[in-house]
Image: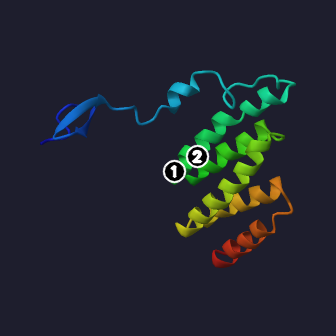
Amino acid sequence: MNEDILPGMRLEYAGLLYAATPAPPTDVWPLYDLRGVRPWVAADTPSDYRSRAMLPFYAYQRASQAARQAQWPEAYGFLAIAKSIGPDVLWLQANAVFEAYRWGAAAFAQHDAVSAAHFFHAILAWDPHEDTARTDLRIVERSHP
């Protein structure tokens, strides 16, 4: 009945018994970091949009992973890097703004006003017409002077 009896294996129910499967590594990012992708390696920007649209994906995924672990400075940093890599990437614009709102609110709920402010400032830098971000930023600044 000891689920930790096989180190490195994950035991999952298979009917009345357990099935042992290799446990996935908990942090695969260092492996990807060795692949020579942006932001780790500077490269010429391709002229075609389809190729350019793929460049910020790695940094965006790193930001998402950091946010799931409430590592707000890392999430903000990788999201900002993604935006700098793909300033004209349409999928990134919408997703970055959406996630920055979510992550800013989550950071604020966890009493991390500095990180929340970073996210709302970023939204305003990416789109100065985002009045909700301006309002959220005022709330953060007033509640944590």
Q: Is residue 103 above or below residue 96?
A: below
Asked whether residue 53 is in view, the answer is: yes
Contact between marks 2 and 1 (CB within 8 A): the answer is yes
**Left or right of 77: which side holds 24?**
left
User: Residue 69: where, in percent of width, then height?
Assistant: 49, 50
**Left or right of 11: which side holds 143?**
right
For the N terminus, the quadrant is top left
Q: Amino acid at mark 2?
A: Ser
Q: Amino acid at mark 1?
A: Arg
- Give the quadrant of residue 91: top right
Q: Secondary structure at mark 2?
A: helix
- Give the residue at x 71% y 50%: 96
Nearest to the observer: residue 138 or residue 20:
20
User: Residue 123: where, in percent of width, then height?
Assistant: 76, 57
Q: Which residue is mark 1?
A: 68
Q: Is residue 125 above or below residue 138?
A: above
User: Residue 100: where, in percent of width, then height?
Assistant: 67, 56
- Give the quadrant of residue 81: top right
Nearest to the observer: residue 77 or residue 19:
19
What is the spatial separation of the Cα atoms under label 2 and label 1, in whole angstroms? Answer: 6 Å
User: Residue 93: where, in percent of width, then height?
Assistant: 77, 48
Mark seen at residue 64: 2
Instruction: Say how many tags the image has.
Output: 2
Query: Which residue sits furthest left?
Result: 1
